[in-house]
Amino acid sequence: MNDELTPVASGFVARFGERTLPAALGPDEQVVLFSEEELDGFEAASGYWRRTVARTELEWLVLIRTVGTFGGEPCIVLDEDEDGLHIAYTGHSGMKAEALGYWMVDHGAYEVVVPREEVFSIRVERVPVP
């Protein structure tokens, strides 16, 4: 990973009107939009503002996530700290994950913290949400 690309937390982002805003999926085709500043139609909620809209009101909705490769296998970057990158295995073999040093955090879910320079092909993906 180079210094120009910093891992970002995973999350949803939506285009609503003239703004791109953090979002969360709600029930029944609803999306909750968040803002750090007061916007028309948004209600105050503990230091930020939010508004629930129908998915049809959005220009687009994407999932943002930082992904890469560790030990030749795909991973997603969960966090970064002084110990390195906290990554989760996104391949399909628990045996490969364990051989690479991942630990099982839940059935079929593996995570590990590795030095930043051991994760390759790091990129930020924008996955469209239909």
Image (cartoon, helix red, strand yellow):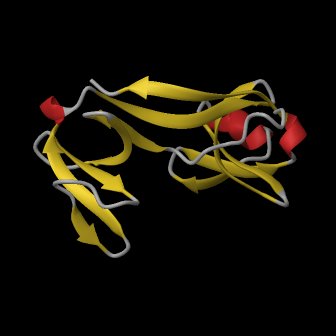
Kindly identify the residue that appears in the image at 53 percent across and 44 percent down: 108
Extreme bottom residue here?
Answer: 46
Image quarter in which the C terminus is found: top left
Image quarter in which the N terminus is found: top right
| x, y percent for residue 110 | 62, 47
Instruction: Using the image, determine if residue 88 lies above or below residue 47.
Output: above
Res 98 quadrant in image: top right
Kindly identify the residue that appears in the image at 49 percent across and 27 percent down: 126
| x, y percent for residue 86 | 71, 51
Counting the numbered discs, the total is 0
- 127 and 97: which one is in front? 127
| x, y percent for residue 117 | 89, 38
Q: Is residue 30 left or right of residue 81?
A: left
Say if residue 92 shows up in the picture. Answer: no
Q: Is residue 108 left or right of residue 111?
A: left
Kindly identify the residue that appears in the image at 33 percent across and 54 percent down: 34
